[in-house]
Image (cartoon, rainbow, N blue to C red):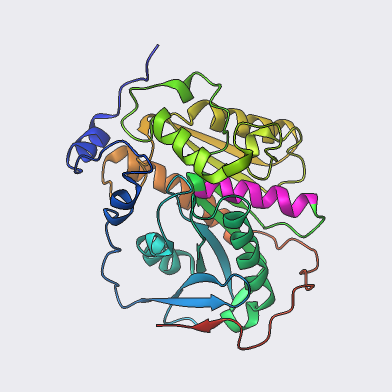
Amino acid sequence: MGAPAVDPGVQQFLDALPASPPLTGETLAAARAAIPPPPPPSGLVEHADLTIPGDPTVRVRLHRRLDVAAELPGILAIHGGGYVMGDAATDDALFEQWCLRFSCVGVSVDYRLAPETPYPGPLDDCYRALRAVRQRSAELGIDPARIGMFGVSAGGGLAAGLSLRLRDRGEPGVAFQVLLYPMLDDRQVTPSSRWTDVPRWDPVANRFGWRSYLGAIDGTPEVPHEAAPARATDLGGLPPTCVIAGTVDGFYDEDVAFAERLRDAGVPAELHVFAGGCHGFATPACQAPLAIRARQVIDDWLAGHLEGPRPAGPVAQDEPFHAATIRRTA
């Protein structure tokens, strides 16, 4: 049985996109270069690159509205790209809207990409970025008790993996997480993961992405659940979570199962499934009614959590940062 039909409005969006070859090691450089640049800034939101020194250096991109100086809630955003593509500027369009609507501060992680940097490198970058944001929250104008995460595709896998790491290490978790068609399971054992007729991110690309990210441990029993969150046997103790899935996505089965297991573990979790949604359908560039509705669901869920009660708990401080260690760059 193949994948269901794509929503007509989303299909029109897909038909307007340039054709791309199958993703392989040979085509990766061209695929990275083909990612469109962010839209021009509105002048209402600042987008500034910051550096967290260390070995290695971690870069993040700060998004903040220019007319508010108060301490604001924060969203750590982790971009998609199958663990092998993308950068922090991908989130510019998103935070042009969210910073104004929610009066929040966005911090997008420019994590290192596979296969040049396999696991745990990308997850380590996200972990260090979150710790730095918490420890320098006063400098960045962020309320450290109201920091959540938003992850798209591979970024959703990294967000879920980071939440598992924080829980396993006994460190304070984030206030919430939104996982937009997250990439969670390296095993490709579900029916939807084997659909060859999905319009974006088919099994060949998925295998390439996971093989690149997991490196030497790919296909072995040593894959930890922080690397592939669907492997976790216990999802208890994770933050309130919103999972968005499309029925024409190879990740459909693993995303639905993950949301249901969160619920069974006692985690406040919502699952929203969009019939006809393919991988990437909710991107800000897609103006199909289905995509607009999905983005509105995310916005409504975020609105409740950004204004919700502040969780108790200390901020971890065992990796000190000095005043100059998060600094603006060109």
Q: Is residue 284 visible?
A: no
Left or right position of 328 against 216: left
Left or right position of 101 against 179: left
| Residue, far top | 1
In the rendered image, the quadrant that contains the C terminus is bottom left
Residues 329 and 181: in front is 329
What residue span does the magenta drawing correspond to? Answer: 155-168
Is 165 within the magenta? Answer: yes
Check the image and report above or below for 201 versus 53: above
Check the image and report above or below for 54 versus 294: below
The location of residue 22, given as percent across then percent down, is 31, 35
The location of residue 271, given as percent across then percent down, is 55, 35
Residue occupying image coordinates x 52% and y 61%: 111
Q: Is residue 296 visible?
A: yes
Q: Which of the 4 image quarters holds residue 136?
A: bottom right
Count of numbered circles in the view: 0
